[in-house]
Image (tube, rainbow, N blue to C red):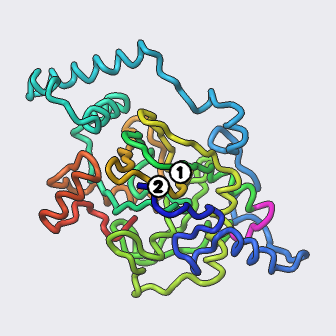
Amino acid sequence: MASAAIQPYELYSDAPGFLLNKPEWEEANAAHPETFDFGKQPRGWPVKFTGPDVWTGDYLEKNSELYIKVLSHGEISEIDSAIKASLLASTLGSETVDSIKEPGEEFAISKSSITHLDPSQRGKIYVSAQDTNAQMYHSDAGGDIVGLMAVSLTGTGGISTVASAGQVYNHLVQHRPDIARLLAERKFRWRANGIPEDGVRLIHNQDNKVFLNFSTRTFIGYGELPDRDRDYPPLTFEEREAFGGWQWVAEQYSLKTQLEVGDIEWVNNLHHQHARRGFTEDISNPRHLLRVWLADSEHSPRLPADIKNKFDAMFESDPDFYPLDEIEEDQKRRETGVFTGSNANDH
Ligand SMILES: [Fe+2]
């Protein structure tokens, strides 16, 4: 059953009237006098980042071989064999191979096989309450790479978008360097594991790359914690304008992807941010994406301390329950009333 028509993304805000939608950002931006001097880039930062992490959606769409890998039948057979071999090697034995009936389960295993997950290195899994609304650009809280696999897609919409933080920064330094300075130099505070009392900076310049891990949901509340933490002051207009600029410049340069069932999308969560369009779904067969947060134990880059502290806090102790997906997690939460994520104050 399709729900009401999807609102145009330009009019969307995660916090209407507070986080700026596109016309509100454009109005705020235009309110500055044309000759206003916004100053220079953040101290110690370049005027422009370059390299493979800096791209525009237009460029990638014209060069799809740079980011889309279509598996051949041979490669798919190889993955099938790997799934069967890994199950046969497990203590569950061969019956398990034949007992897989749920597509979600098989997808999860194939995704694990492709991404070479090491079960001994797993951290906590946090699954926030999801809805059909759009999302603004954000980082996910807990990993270098966000992996998504489309298990079921019904209805319309739900396009996945990704933007290069280096590209957003380059644009802002040209047009609104004050916003780049605010995000690079000001410390923002919120209550979450790994966030020190004096706060963290939101974008970082390290090894000639922009690193970031932030979400504006932190400042407005989301999911289990729909209200912002009132122990901290609300965002100022200047900060809201900065987030509006970041959001809509990210959208301007984003890569837009309509996933199909069976597609797996990996997004670098250290140098990019992602968002999503709103969608409709058939409630008898709801949209279902499996998500994992990954850290490459061999090739992960050196992280800025603000991000490292946050990630380390998520892996400090082992959880007692690993859901297969958000449906199993929701079920468990209903049964126990206990939320399984370690970072319930973070999003
Ligand atoms: Fe996300």
- Which label belongs to residue 206? none
Element marked by disc 2: loop
Whether residue 66 is in magenta: the answer is no
Residue at 47% in and 55% down: 280
Where's residue 151, x and y in %?
A: 37, 39
Where's residue 155, x and y in %?
A: 46, 49
Where's residue 169, x and y in %?
A: 69, 57
Q: Residue lying farthest right?
A: 35
Residue at 61% in and 77% down: 240
Examine the image and state in which quarter residue 246 appears.
bottom right
Q: Quadrant of the C terminus?
A: bottom left
Q: Residue lying farthest top?
A: 74
Examine the image and state in which quarter residue 29 appears.
bottom right
Label 2 neighbour load within 10 Å: few <14, some 14-19, many 20+: many
Label 1 neighbour load within 10 Å: few <14, some 14-19, many 20+: some
Q: Name the residue type under label 2.
A: Thr
Left or right, residue 134 beside residue 195: right
Which residues lie in the magenta part? 173-179
Q: Name the residue type under label 1.
A: Gly
Element marked by disc 1: loop
Q: Is mark 2 within 8 Å of ligand 1?
A: no
Q: Is residue 71 above or below residue 26?
A: above
Q: Is residue 137 above or below residue 189?
A: above
Residue marked by disc 2: 280
Asked if marks 1 and 2 touch (Cβ < 8 Å), the reply is yes
Where's residue 311, x and y in %?
A: 37, 56
Whether residue 178 is in magenta: the answer is yes
Residue at 21% in and 39% down: 120
Residue marked by disc 1: 157
